Image (tube, grey):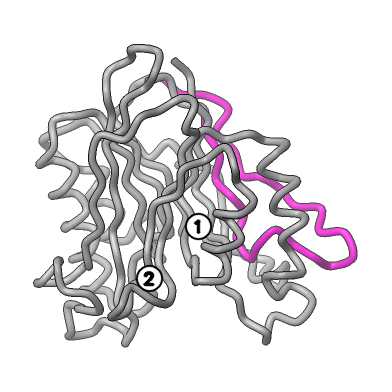
Amino acid sequence: MKIKVFSFNIRMDNTNDGINYFPHRTDRIKELIDRENPDLIGFQETREMARKWLSENLKEYTLLGCGRLKGFKGEGVTLAYKRDKFDLFSYNTEWLSTEPAVPESTYGGDQSPCPRVLQYATLIPRDGTEPFAFFNVHLDHIGKDAKKFGSMQTLQRILAQPYRFILTGDFNALPDDGAITLIKNCKSRKITDISEGLGGSFHDWGKREDFTKIDYIFTDFEKYENVHLVRDEHPNGVYYTDHYIVSAEIEI
């Protein structure tokens, strides 16, 4: 079974983005998802406005996710999967911290004030293919130690479960950063950064010429193809988001 996967930082709703404020981008996002028709999407930076819009407009998908603050409000990450292709076996949300079950908890130290969450689900393909795990994460944007700890916690959860996996995420880390090499150099499983070599993904509404690669798809499935960044013609200055979306087709 071949599935299409997106890692999609949708950019939080922020009125300071002007023409690219989230409500101005929704028509383009809907057109993109309808056209590209991914089977799995790992969204980052979803707030209440985006989660509500996604649930109302992505009718073919089941959406899993909550905010990272107390009361499960605020920004978080969201998993989306095609409900006609997969059944849900299990699902977890945990905070990247020494107390992963405590909402709004952090590692402290050099971490920014922002809590960070990891979400993962075990999905059962309806065609009889073996179950697999789908992980989605957004690491801290400031703390070098916090990024590495978050990456380590994510890797520990991957290794603690028995299934093959797909991991999407905005790691806020360059390819040679310890948060990335920790996963790629794992000794327990052969894990591949299938987005390696794609070039930069964060373009900041087209303001950056030296695009920064911080968005990734990792997996231990061996067969994959058509890995690329979804380019954006941004008509009238309106982008899908301030990152290029990472897209891949994976044989599971």
Callout 2 environment at 10 Å: few (<14), some (14 to 19), or many (20+)?
Answer: many
181 over 127 or under it: above or below = below
User: At x 40% / y 28%, what residue is drawn?
Assistant: 86
Dot 2 amino acid type: Gly
Mark 1 residue element: loop
Q: Which quadrant would residue 78 be assigned to in this image? A: bottom left
In the drawing, does residue 58 fall left or right of residue 18?
left
Is residue 2 inside the magenta stretch?
no
For label 2, the residue is 67
* Residue 168 on image: x %, y %: 40, 47
Is residue 242 inside the magenta stretch?
yes
User: At x 46% / y 43%, what residue is drawn?
Assistant: 62
21 over 231 or under it: above or below = below
In the drawing, does residue 112 fall left or right of residue 44?
left
| Foreground residue among 92 and 59 | 59
* Residue 174 on image: x %, y %: 41, 60
* Residue 236 on image: x %, y %: 90, 65
Q: Which residues are magenta?
A: 223-248
Callout 1 environment at 10 Å: few (<14), some (14 to 19), or many (20+)?
Answer: many
Mark 2 residue element: strand
Q: Report, in whole angstroms, how far the alpha carbon at label 2 lies from the one at label 1.
A: 25 Å
User: At x 62% / y 81%, what residue is drawn?
Assistant: 14
Point out the tag, 2 or 1, that comes first from the N-terminus.
2
226 over 199 or under it: above or below = above
For label 1, the residue is 213
Quadrant of the drawing holding the N terminus: top left
